[in-house]
Image: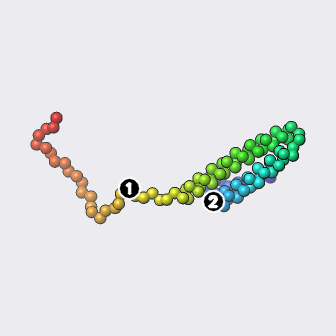
């Protein structure tokens, strides 16, 4: 069976290769549905059912990866929680009370 998908790892994929894999997977899914529609032998029908399920799982995975890449690209840099000040920070010292509390 001819492989329609790239063999590079998901870490190295860029937006274009994910979109290309999604398009190829969609085409493979259409082909599998066409084969299912034209199959008359029960064994072939079972084969196409398994093929459609496998391709649907791959399609779902690729859509999730594309969503992750999209959300990572849109995430802004976090703003600092405080502003840097030109005033030097002086350590606090606490006074000793002449009486005991308690």
Q: Dot 2, how many residues are within 10 Å of its Cα: few (below 14), some (14-19), or many (20+)? A: few
Please, which residue is most extreme toward the left here? 98
| Location of residue 1 with respect to 41 vertically, above or below | below
> Is 63 positioned to the left or the right of 42 in the image?
left
Question: Which quarter of the picture shows residue 42?
Answer: top right
Decide which of tag 1 and tag 2 comes sooner along the chain.
Answer: 2
Q: Is residue 91 visible?
A: yes
Residue situated in front as seen by the camera: 22 or 91: 22
The secondary element bearing badge 2 is classed as loop
> How many marks are shown on the rendered structure?
2
Q: Which residue is mark 2?
A: 14
Dots 1, 2 in contact, CB < 8 A = no
The secondary element bearing badge 1 is classed as loop
Q: Dot 1, how many residues are within 10 Å of its Cα: few (below 14), some (14-19), or many (20+)? A: few
Q: Which residue is mark 1?
A: 81
> Is 87 positioned to the left or the right of 25 in the image?
left
Residue 93 in percent (x, y) is at 20, 50
Residue 40 in percent (x, y) is at 89, 41
Q: How is the image coloured?
A: rainbow
- Quadrant in which the C terminus appears: top left
| Location of residue 58 with respect to 83 vertically, above or below | above
| Point 83% across, 49% down: residue | 34
Residue 4 in percent (x, y) is at 76, 54
Please, which residue is most extreme toward the top here? 102
| Point 76% across, 45% down: residue | 52
Please, which residue is most extreme toward the right here? 40
Q: CA distance from mark 1 to mark 2?
A: 32 Å
Please, which residue is most extreme toward the bottom here? 86
Q: Is residue 6 visible?
A: no
> Is 20 positioned to the left or the right of 88 in the image?
right
Residue 38 in percent (x, y) is at 87, 46
| Point 67% across, 48% down: residue | 60
């Amino acid at each position: 069976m001819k492989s329609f998908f790239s063999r590079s790892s998901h870490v190295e994929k860029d937006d274009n290769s994910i979109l290309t894999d999604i398009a190829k997977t969609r085409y493979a899914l259409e082909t599998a549905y066409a084969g299912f529609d034209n199959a008359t032998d029960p064994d072939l029908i079972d084969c196409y059912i398994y093929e459609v399920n496998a391709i649907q799982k791959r399609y779902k995975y690729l859509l999730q990866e594309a969503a992750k890449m999209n959300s990572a690209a849109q995430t802004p840099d976090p703003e600092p929680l405080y502003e840097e000040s030109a005033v030097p920070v002086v350590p606090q010292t606490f006074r000793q009370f002449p009486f005991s509390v308690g």
